[in-house]
Amino acid sequence: MKRGALFLSILFLIILILNFNLVSAKTSCDVKDCKITITIYLAFAGATDSQINSWSQEISNVWNGNGQTTGDCKCPVNFKVNTSKVTNCSPMPAGYHCIQILPWNGTDASLPHLPAGPNAGKAVVAYVGKTTQSPSVGGASLDGEWSNITSRPVDPNDPSKGNYLDAAHEIGHMLGLADGSGGLMNFTSGNDAKPTQQHIDDAVNNVCGPNACPDKCCCGNGVIDNNKGEQCDPKANPRGCSLNDVCCPICCQCDLTRIQSFNLTYVPLGMFSNERINFYSNLEPHFHIITSNNQIIDAGKGKLENPTINVFSDEETINAIHDGEISFIQAMNDGRLIYEGEGFFNKIKFKIISFLVDIF
């Protein structure tokens, strides 16, 4: 195989690996700069564009209505809906929850009927969990049936009373919430028909995991949170550092490390451009960095949780990199630095990148 064709084949494989999570997502979580975005991928069979737009707007308004936050450090949470139209929900479209829309003819017989459980056969306006387990665990795909009168007016003769929030309620199940847990999961109209703080916290925990809003996200809140390991805060007065030190605006530490001066532009193929990296010296954790778009956005001593790559070297090399005496690329070329991806897909990704570096 020619080098060009080989390169394109490997590049295509890398793209597939990097986009795997997007393909498999039903309800996905993205955490960036301590801001959490939860995206619900929702397919409709038999719905009009107007209905889909109306339900999507309802979901967004309800779940984002109060400037939602989560955790001790009050990380902002934003809920998004990504919709699609399909012919039917059997088989379910990959990467989506799927809702079959049933036309209402004015009778209970035309409404969706619960397929199982203690209320099996009961006529309802909407439900999820037709052939899947509801509520969702970890964002797993759900299917269900909604009537086309889902989220109908509370009082057709009095528009001021608004609509029922059936669609927003069903989304709660897709976020891992059960019926009867208060607020929106108990009521679809009235003042209590909104997500509670517990709903937001439980949804984030179910979809994103238990550490989506870590202690470091308290940095910059204007308070020196000693219980979160902070030495200072850039917005506090006084900031908490001595006259000879400055307060790191990202890590809230006074002893800024010089590793923030690393130039990642010269690392081949942008291999460390968006990573969580632990550096080990003689197999012991030495320091860590977090990168985004070829910039070091966080750095500190010790081990980082949930790394994407681990770098192993000796104390002399680590200190030389730390002090800026040699670069990443020089240490790599000299064989003084070894790296490996953490987790199955990262292992494959960095093996492929290493192979490309050797070729080119």
Image (cartoon, helix red, strand yellow):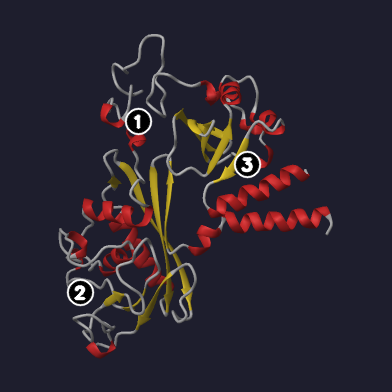
> What residue is disc 2 on?
156
Q: Mark 1, residues whose alpha carbon is within 10 Å: few (<14), some, or many (≥20)?
A: many
Q: Which three-letter amino acid code belongs to the residue tagged 2? A: Pro
Whether residue 330 is situated above or below residue 208 in the rendered picture = above
Q: Which three-letter amino acid code belongs to the residue tagged 3? A: Met
Q: Residue 271: which numbered mark, if any?
A: 3
Whether residue 107 is visible: no
Whether residue 172 is situated above or below residue 201 in the rendered picture = below
Whether residue 231 is situated above or below residue 147 in the rendered picture = above
Q: Mark 3, residues whose alpha carbon is within 10 Å: few (<14), some, or many (≥20)?
A: some
Q: Position of residue 41 (x, y in %)?
A: 43, 64
Q: Position of residue 196 (x, y in %)?
A: 21, 54
Q: Given this view, does label 3 or label 2 mark the residue nearer the observer? A: 3
Compare marks 3 and 2 and give the one earlier in the sequence.
2
Q: Position of residue 15 (x, y in %)?
A: 63, 55
The quadrant the N terminus occupies is: bottom right
Q: Which three-letter amino acid code belongs to the residue tagged 1? A: Cys
